[in-house]
Image (tube, rainbow, N blue to C red):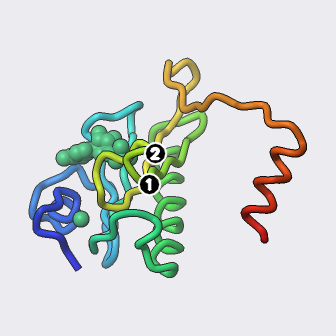
Amino acid sequence: MKDDQCIFCKIANGEIPSRTIYEDEHFRVILDNGPATDGHALVLPKDHYRDLFEMPEDLAAQAMKTAKKTAELLKEKLHADGLNLVQNNGEVAGQTVPHFHIHLIPRYKNDGQTIAWNATHPDDAQLDAVLDKVTK
Ligand code: 5GP
Ligand code: ZN
């Protein structure tokens, strides 16, 4: 299903041109137009799912296969030293376009980028309380 109001639906399905580095029946991988580094790319499903929670499990698995394939391409062609996979779900998590996508961010020594969070320091009881919530 497509969403008429969604820019990534239009890009993924070729209605809006994009710098495409890979395409198959279910996905298009494009260059991000506000890249963190050279080669920053986005894996877009052609059907509209808002986020990981809406994605069917099979398609999510295929998205990761596509990410791996294109990560290898980017690493080889751009001589990247490393690569971050980033996938944001929900505004609070930094998602700005509500159409599922995986960021592929090639990393280069001294590229000046940081993809980071602030570590907290819970004690054992706090960690155990979280474990209980998740597993019980
Ligand atoms: P998010 O913050 O939702 O995880 O990531 C959205 C990403 O999409 C951003 O990195 C942004 O630069 C990229 N982006 C937004 N609009 C467009 C567009 O029209 N074309 C391309 N190629 N990238 C876009
Ligand atoms: Zn969409």
Q: Position of residue 49 (x, y in %)?
A: 33, 70
Which image quarter is the N terminus in? bottom left
Q: Position of residue 35 (x, y in %)?
A: 34, 34
Q: Residue at x 17, y 70 (%)?
A: 3
Q: Position of residue 103 (x, y in %)?
A: 43, 48
37 vs 55: above or below: above
109 vs 9: above or below: above
Q: Residue at x 55, y 42 (%)?
A: 84
Given the image, on which type of amino acid does mark 1 rest?
A: Asn
Q: Nearer the viewer, residue 21 or 3?
A: 3
Q: Residue at x 80, y 58 (%)?
A: 131
Query: Which of the 4 image quarters holds residue 22?
Result: bottom left
Element assignment for label 2: helix
Q: What count of labels does the image hold?
A: 2
Q: Nearer the viewer, residue 40 or 9?
A: 9
Residue 89: mark in rendering: 1
Mark 2 and mark 1 in contact (Cβ < 8 Å)? yes
Query: Which of the 4 image quarters holds residue 10?
Result: bottom left
Is 96 left or right of 71, judged from the image as shown? Answer: left
* One can see residue 51 in this view: yes
Is 103 left or right of 21, judged from the image as shown? Answer: right
